Image (cartoon, rainbow, N blue to C red):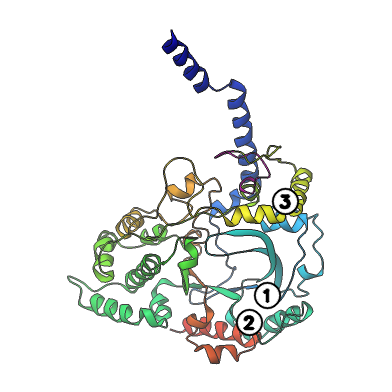
């Protein structure tokens, strides 16, 4: 009899009330509704370019994050929602978000480290996509300097807060990458290999793709700490989907891609060997910060379900700011892993990534990565491989995440440049590539 009683007790404890399942379903539906409304557009992979470009032209677009140690932005519920990816045209944002220029729009970017995010945000000035000559012959550079003066950001202190993205024809990728010191040897070896390859030399497009693959693999394999994977893709990050690019190759070159890249690069190995973690949008920040009921793990005293209406989201954001120290502490203490149910997730190996590319997939993009699909935010690789290639826009888009390295400057010389000169130097690089 005691054994039967114990068995019944275990059985009763193992059966969850039906209302629990109903609550979980509604909870998941709320998060899914927010994703569809505010974040699903990222999955379209739309390229940021401009109409009317000639085939040889190289468009450029800038992002300039106001340095966090030089500008203190008071967070409001509206700014916190925007920092987490939820925006509304009705939000009142203040003068810091008015660039005063047709060339620049100001958005909110988040602050964090290699493996954590916090609630604080900063203004980020984003330029329209332009031709290089427009940068050199317009007020675009001086308009940024004027905006920074309005925010009282010193003009000569911080020089690492801007990035830029170029759209480059695939056959000119070699001319771009050979400017990177650690790619000099790979560029020379790849050029030699392609000239001597039997039964025929490489096409210029294929040689460019061989170099791109080696660049991505080297930066991923050398990532020395667990964290957000795109942070190790520096100085250049490939924004174009690698699987789309391989489908533009002749069949013979596409079939040789895996073995030839591994031969040039030095063999197969695990990418991001220390681990990877995904990004949190506002809903996941509220969830992980203990402010709403969680989809995973034990509750931390949260009293409410995730709201979906904007007015209620603003109230939640206000409560998060009232409990900011606690929420930030929870976000900082997050383990370095993909926030997903089930097994731990890791990056692919070099061979797996290349085989996926050969088949038209990009396993280090949120489009095709199983880890990204499992993530509760569906955002792991972020801009890596996010833009889809098409015949209408056949350029390869690369984001420079370290302008000093991309432009080949020594640190002392770089720091002597004004912000306007930095922007113009990037435009001259783009202009040089138009005639390479």
The answer to which of marks 1 and 2 sits earlier in the sequence is: 1
Q: Secondary structure at mark 2?
A: loop
For the residue pair 397 and 319, the one nearer the viewer reads as 319
Q: Residue furthest left?
A: 199
Closer to us: mark 1 or mark 2?
A: 1
Magenta segment: 287-298
The answer to which of marks 2 and 3 sits earlier in the sequence is: 2
Task: Estimate how packed mark 3 is, as few (under 14), some (14 to 19) or many (20 or more) residues with alpha carbons within 10 Å.
Answer: many
The answer to which of marks 3 and 1 sits earlier in the sequence is: 1
Magenta span includes 292: yes
Is there CB contact under 8 Å for labels 1 and 2?
A: yes
Q: Which mark is residue 158?
A: 2
Indicate the position of residue 380 as horizontal and vertical percent values: 50, 54
Task: Estimate how packed mark 1 is, as few (under 14), some (14 to 19) or many (20 or more) residues with alpha carbons within 10 Å.
Answer: few
Magenta span includes 58: no
Indicate the position of residue 342 as horizontal and vertical percent values: 44, 40
Q: What is the spatial separation of the Cα atoms under label 2 and label 3, in whole angstroms?
A: 31 Å
Is there CB contact under 8 Å for labels 3 and 1?
A: no
Q: Secondary structure at mark 3?
A: helix
Q: Which mark is residue 69?
A: 1
Q: What is the spatial separation of the Cα atoms under label 3 and label 1, in whole angstroms?
A: 23 Å
Residue 60 visible (yes or no): no
Q: Which mark is residue 10?
A: none
66 w.r.t. 290: above or below = below
Residue 209 visible (yes or no): yes
For the residue pair 436 and 64, the one nearer the viewer reads as 64
Residue underneath mark 3: 320
Closer to us: mark 2 or mark 3?
A: 3
């Amino acid at each position: 009899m005691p054994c039967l009683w114990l068995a019944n007790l275990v059985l009763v404890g193992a059966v969850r009330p039906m209302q629990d399942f109903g609550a979980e379903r509604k909870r998941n539906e709320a998060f899914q509704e927010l994703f569809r409304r505010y974040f699903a557009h990222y999955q379209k992979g739309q390229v940021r370019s401009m109409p009317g470009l000639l085939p040889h032209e190289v468009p450029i677009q800038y992002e300039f994050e106001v340095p966090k140690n030089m500008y203190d932005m008071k967070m409001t519920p509206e700014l916190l929602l925007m920092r987490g990816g939820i925006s509304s045209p009705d939000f009142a944002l203040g003068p810091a978000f008015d660039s005063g220029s047709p060339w620049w729009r100001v958005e909110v970017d988040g602050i964090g480290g290699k493996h954590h995010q916090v609630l604080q945000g900063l203004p980020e000035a984003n330029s329209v996509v332009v031709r290089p000559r427009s940068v050199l012959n317009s007020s675009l550079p001086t308009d940024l300097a004027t905006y920074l003066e309005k925010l009282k950001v010193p003009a000569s202190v911080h020089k690492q807060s801007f990035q830029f993205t170029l759209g480059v024809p695939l056959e000119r990728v070699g001319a771009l990458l050979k400017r990177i010191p650690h790619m000099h040897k790979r560029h020379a070896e790849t050029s030699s290999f392609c000239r001597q390859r039997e039964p025929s030399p490489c096409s210029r497009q294929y040689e460019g793709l061989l170099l791109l693959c080696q660049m991505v693999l080297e930066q991923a394999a050398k990532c020395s700490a667990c964290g957000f994977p795109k942070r190790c893709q520096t100085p250049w990050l490939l924004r174009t989907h690698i699987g789309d690019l391989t489908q533009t190759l002749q069949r013979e070159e596409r079939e040789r891609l895996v073995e030839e890249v591994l031969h040039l690069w030095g063999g197969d190995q695990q990418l991001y060997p220390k681990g990877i973690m995904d990004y949190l949008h506002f809903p996941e920040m509220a969830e992980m910060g203990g402010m709403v009921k969680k989809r995973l793990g034990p509750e931390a005293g949260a009293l409410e379900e995730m709201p979906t209406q904007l007015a209620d989201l603003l109230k939640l954001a206000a409560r998060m700011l009232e409990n900011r120290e606690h929420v930030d502490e929870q976000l900082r203490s997050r383990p370095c892993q993909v926030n997903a149910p089930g097994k731990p997730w890791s990056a692919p190996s070099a061979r797996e990534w290349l085989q996926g590319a050969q088949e038209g997939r990009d396993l280090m993009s949120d489009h095709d990565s199983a880890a990204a699909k499992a993530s509760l935010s569906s955002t792991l690789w972020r801009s890596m491989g996010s833009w889809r290639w098409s015949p209408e826009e056949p350029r390869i888009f690369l984001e420079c995440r370290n302008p000093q390295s991309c432009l080949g400057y020594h640190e002392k010389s770089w720091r002597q440049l004004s912000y306007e000169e930095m922007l113009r130097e990037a435009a001259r690089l783009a202009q040089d590539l138009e005639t390479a």
